[in-house]
Image (tube, rainbow, N blue to C red):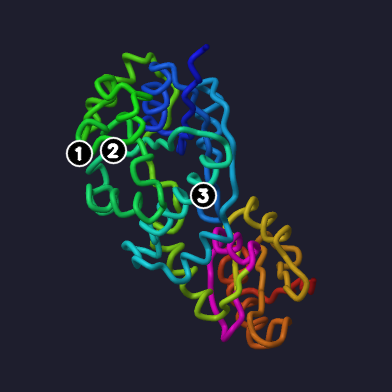
Amino acid sequence: MAKKKVKALFLFSGGLDSLLGVKILEKQGIKVDLIFFKSYFFSPDQARQSARDNKLKLKVIDISEEQLAIVKSPRHGYGKAINPCLDCHALMLQQARQIMSEGGYNFVATGEVLGQRPMSQSKERLKLVEKESGLQGFLVRPLSAKVMQITIPEKQGLIDRQKLEGISGRSRKQQLVLARKFKLVNYPTPAGGCLLTDLEFARRLKGLLSKKKKISPSDIELLKLGRHYWEGKNKIVVGREEAENKKLVKLAEVGDTLLTIKKVAGPTTLIRSYGTSKSASAQAIKKARQLTQQHAPRARGKEIDFREKKI
């Protein structure tokens, strides 16, 4: 009887560590399926591009609502901004555990490196998220396996531990050596991909959550654009360039007001009410006009007319 194929479910970010983890497992003849968990706060674009460049298949799963609930009330608190990294990590691994069970996978794997991020990838914290996800013993980290506790798939002989790596710390020298070994040429440079770690975005999100507890996808997309101001419970967003102006028009919802200057080039401004009334207040409209003129150099100090459109 033919030996049953070993199957791994890999949480793929698209970066070098993920690519190396996949290659290390594939070299042992393991079938590796890639998944990416997208949300309001991180995009799958880089992972998709990396998968295409390296001829890998990638499945994208949306966890936006589940992650938003965690952002509002994280069990383990926030990082420097509004990033509940431990809770988000545990959430993704919980989702992966369910897929592993339903899909007949032998284990879940990631490209994590012990100690690469001191706050979230210490040995204690990696153990913590593994425990909270319910994946104890079935979470394999190929790049750091030799400096971590042996896993059940290794004990079962499904993986050869001697062919895994023992990388730890923030240096990437060993990863670059492996990249040359596997002849990897198309991989993105390390970068923070989660908006929740961005201090300015975090400030905007905190402000929004203080005004409205139940926020929509459109509310979150709005946080990614323009210059932001509040007038009471009215959010005023002033576009910074033409592409943003167009996006603001597309994001406008019933009750919103769009403001532009007639006959003079300038920004598009969106006003959204988070109060009991869906319409922007007169004071918010007045402030929005002032801000729109202020951010239109050709209109400053002049008598101008506005184009106002209520959606």
- Which numbered marker is on residue 271? none
Q: Is residue 80 magenta?
A: no
Q: How far separated are the C-alphas under marks 2 and 1?
A: 7 Å
The magenta region covers: 216-235
Q: Out of 169 and 246, give the one closest to the viewer.
A: 169
Q: How far separated are the C-alphas under marks 1 and 3?
A: 27 Å
Res 109 → quadrant: top left
Q: Position of residue 13 (x, y in %)?
A: 45, 38
Secondary structure of the residue carrying tag 2 is loop
Q: Amino acid at mark 2?
A: Val
Q: How far separated are the C-alphas under marks 3 and 2?
A: 21 Å
Q: Is residue 57 visible?
A: yes
Res 304 → quadrant: bottom right
Q: Position of residue 236 (x, y in %)?
A: 60, 73
Q: Amino acid at mark 3?
A: Gln
Query: Nearer the observer, disc 3 or disc 2?
Result: 3
Res 245 → quadrant: bottom right
Q: Amino acid at mark 1?
A: Gly
- Which numbered marker is on residue 113? 2
Instruction: Name the residue carrying label 3.
Output: 95
Q: Position of residue 105 (x, y in %)?
A: 50, 33
Secondary structure of the residue carrying tag 1 is loop
Question: Against 274, is 266 above or below?
Answer: above
Q: Residue at x 61, y 63 (%)?
A: 298
Q: Is residue 296 visible?
A: no
Q: Position of residue 107 (x, y in %)?
A: 43, 35
Q: Earlier in the sequence, mark 3 or mark 2?
A: 3
